[in-house]
Amino acid sequence: MADDYPAQRRRYFLGQAVLQRRKELGLSQEDLADRVGWDRKSVGRLENGVHAVTIDRLWRITDELHVTIGELEREAAAIARRRGQPLPPPEPGR
C-alpha cells in the first residue's frame, strides 16, 4: 500500500483553502453546512483535513464559495508554500 501522507497533506491544505474562502465571504461553518447539506462539524472536519469529500460534494462546496476546483487547488498549494510545506505534484491516475 502506498504512503497516504501526501494525500493527507493535500486534504489538509484543501480544507485550509475552503476555510480561507469561507471567511473571505463572511460565512460561518454553519452557513456553509446549510448550503451544502452537511452539519457544522462536518465542515470543520473538512477544513481540518480530517474529512475527505466526494467530487460531487466538492463541486457543491466550490459553487457555494464561488470558486472553481482548480482555483481552490491553487490556493491550497499557495497556503502550503507559505507555510514552508509545498505539496508534491499529484500522482498519475489520482
Image (cartoon, rainbow, N blue to C red):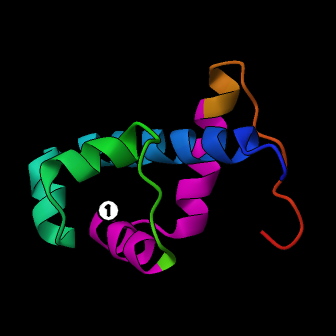
Residue 66 magenta-highlighted? yes
Quickly name the residue at label 1.
65
Question: Image quadrant of residue 48?
Answer: top left
Q: Quadrant of the C terminus?
A: bottom right
Coordinates of residue 44 in the picture (x, y in percent): 27, 42
Q: Position of residue 3 (x, y in %)?
A: 80, 43
| Residue farthest toward the bottom in the current orientation of the protein | 56
Compared across the picture, whether 16 is left or right of 44 comes to right
Among the 4 quarters of the image, the one containing residue 6: top right
Task: Identify whether 79 is placed above or below 19.
Answer: above
User: Residue flagged by tag 1: what amino acid is it?
Assistant: Leu
Q: Which of 16 and 50 is in front in this view?
A: 50
Q: Does the magenta stretch include residue 71?
A: yes
Q: Is the magenta stretch mostly helix, strand or loop?
A: helix
- Work out whether residue 42 or residue 36 is closer to the camera in this orientation and state it: 42
Q: Which residue lies furthest to the front in this view?
A: 1
What span is colored magenta in the figure? 56-79
Quarter holding residue 64: bottom left
Name the residue: 34% across, 76% down: 60
Helix, strand or loop at disc 1? helix
As rendered, which of 11 and 50 lies closer to the eye? 50
Instruction: Give residue 56's position: percent from left, percent from top.
Output: 43, 81
